[in-house]
């Protein structure tokens, strides 16, 4: 008797542990654990992008791939590079490092170029040597090797690049915002840096859905363990 009842009683536990596997992923935690992404994390935070990425990941069936530039990568930028960008361009630069689908590093060797990023049409090109597990990513301005994996598990891949992926549209030869100084005879009446118009004050991150999911998982665990305990009595 017990031998037929046991698998049935375990079923809820199995189902709920799958829910557990799909609990929200803490992108901040993954990058913080990596230990060399403080600039990337700070910029993502300043641009309010962390919760946006986590929500998108949570609601997506395809997952996400993040190419995380190390602190060394940011330190290697020409000074003033980030300051040459306005807030919107900074967000686009960060989103240029994110693909709206999960890929393993091996997958990236054979994707069709250019790959769209969360920065819209601005694409990345991936080139790999078959059987080498080595992949380069190119923007047209920089080419860099993916040199490490922080996480390679659906639905999220986080891979390390030791250069910031500078988009051609911002930093290429014909970009509107070249790092040195805008050429041309145009009178410069743009306001000084550091005083962007404040327009996004009312944008509180919502944590309600997270709490709901977590409560559901907790209840599932309690039910699952309770049923196991009951089944062990027979
Ligand atoms: C995510 O990880 C960070 C860093 O480890 C931690 O401070 C934060 O509380 C975590 N957030 C959640 C929702 O667990
Ligand atoms: C990646 O780029 C490096 C130089 O930047 C080059 O030596 C290497 O052959 C490239 N690898 C692939 C797979 O394209
Ligand atoms: C990316 O790949 C596409 C297709 O092969 C090519 O047309 C384009 O020039 C490449 N761009 C860069 C920046 O390498």
Image (tube, rainbow, N blue to C red):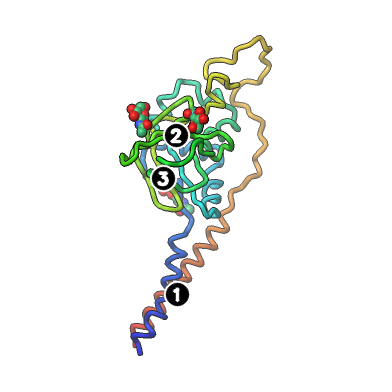
Residue 193 is drawn in which quadrant?
top right
Q: What residue is drawn where x is 67% and y is 12%?
A: 186
- For marks 1 and 3, the one nearer the N-term is 1
- The span from disc 3 to disc 2 (Cα, nearest Å) is 28 Å
Name the element at disc 3: helix
- For marks 3 and 2, the one nearer the N-term is 2
- The span from disc 2 to disc 1 (Cα, nearest Å) is 43 Å
Q: Residue furthest bottom?
A: 1
Residue closest to the eye, 217 or 114: 114
| Residue 107 - label | 3
Residue 75 picture location, percent across and down: 41, 26
Q: Residues within 10 Å of mark 3 (few under 14, many from 20)?
A: few
| Residue 12 - label | 1
Q: What residue is drawn where x is 56% and y is 15%?
A: 181
Q: Residue furthest left?
A: 132
Q: Is residue 144 above or below residue 48?
A: above
């Amino acid at each position: 008797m017990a031998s037929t009842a046991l698998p049935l009683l375990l079923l809820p536990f199995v189902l709920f542990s799958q829910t557990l596997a799909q609990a929200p992923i803490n992108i901040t935690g993954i990058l913080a654990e990596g230990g060399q992404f403080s600039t990337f994390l700070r910029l993502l935070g300043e641009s309010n992008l962390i919760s946006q990425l986590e929500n998108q990941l949570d609601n997506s069936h395809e997952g996400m791939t993040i190419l995380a530039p190390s602190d060394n990568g940011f330190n290697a930028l020409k000074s003033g590079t980030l300051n040459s960008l306005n807030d919107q361009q900074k967000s686009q630069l960060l989103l240029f490092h994110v693909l709206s689908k999960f890929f393993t590093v091996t997958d990236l060797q054979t994707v069709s170029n250019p790959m769209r990023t969360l920065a819209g049409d601005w694409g990345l090109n991936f080139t790999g040597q078959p059987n080498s597990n080595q992949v380069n990513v190119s923007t047209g301005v920089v080419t860099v090797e993916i040199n490490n994996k922080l996480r390679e598990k659906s639905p999220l891949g986080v891979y390390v690049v030791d250069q910031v992926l500078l988009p051609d549209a911002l930093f290429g030869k014909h970009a509107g915002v070249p790092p040195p100084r805008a050429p041309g005879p145009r009178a410069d009446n743009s306001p000084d840096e550091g005083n962007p118009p404040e327009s996004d004050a009312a944008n509180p991150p919502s944590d309600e859905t997270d709490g709901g999911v977590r409560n559901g998982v907790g209840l599932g665990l309690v039910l699952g363990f309770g049923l196991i305990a009951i089944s062990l009595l027979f």
